[in-house]
Image: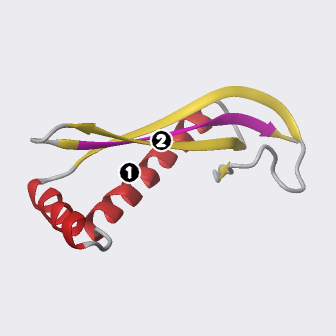
Amino acid sequence: MTITVTTTHAVEGRKIAGYLGIVTGEAVMGTNFVSDWFAGIRDVFGGRSGSYQKLLNRAKDQAVADLRERAVELGADAVVGVDLDYQVIGGDEKTLLLVVANGTAVKLG
């Protein structure tokens, strides 16, 4: 089953027949020493951190996939009003990246 996930509050051309509740998907990804070290070098010399970008994209994809699974469990056709929040957790020794996706599971008419 395909679940439409959108940041808008409606699905183009479809009517929302019912609201099933708020759904959330989370992903917590750990970085490693090598990516942290290279990111530190990038901070000094400038540029983009490819390893962090890949990690961020994987975390976002996992959070949205988790959100979809929870919507399916509720019998939803779509999730509207999706918001993505990003946090970095940790200190000098270990850094964790947290991505949370929130939205409203809906039944479409």
Tell me the kind of residue under disc 2.
Asp
Q: Quadrant of residue 83?
A: top right
Secondary structure predominantly adopted by residues drawn in magenta: strand
Residue that label 2 marks: 66
> Where 45 sits versus 94, above or below?
below
* CA separation in Å, label 2 and label 1: 10 Å
Given the current orientation, which residue lies at the most extreme front position? 44
Q: Could you say whether the residue bearing mark 2 is in a helix, strand or loop? A: helix
Viewer-proximal residue, 9 or 79? 9
Tell me the kind of residue under disc 1.
Ala
Residue that label 1 marks: 59
Viewer-proximal residue, 70 or 97? 97
**Dot 2 or dot 1, earlier in sequence:** 1
- Quadrant containing the C terminus is top right
Task: Please provide percent x and percent y for residue 81.
Answer: 70, 41
Q: Is residue 17 left or right of residue 25?
A: right
Viewer-proximal residue, 85 or 21? 85
Q: Residues within 10 Å of mark 1 (few under 14, many from 20)?
A: many
Q: Which mark is residue 40?
A: none
Q: Is residue 14 left or right of residue 68?
A: right
Q: Is residue 103 located in the magenta-colored stretch of the structure?
A: yes
Q: Is residue 95 left or right of residue 47?
A: left
Which residue is found at the position 65% from the left and 49% from the top?
A: 3
Q: Is residue 73 located in the magenta-colored stretch of the structure?
A: no
Give the magenta range. Answer: 96-107
Task: Please provide percent x and percent y for residue 24.
Answer: 53, 33
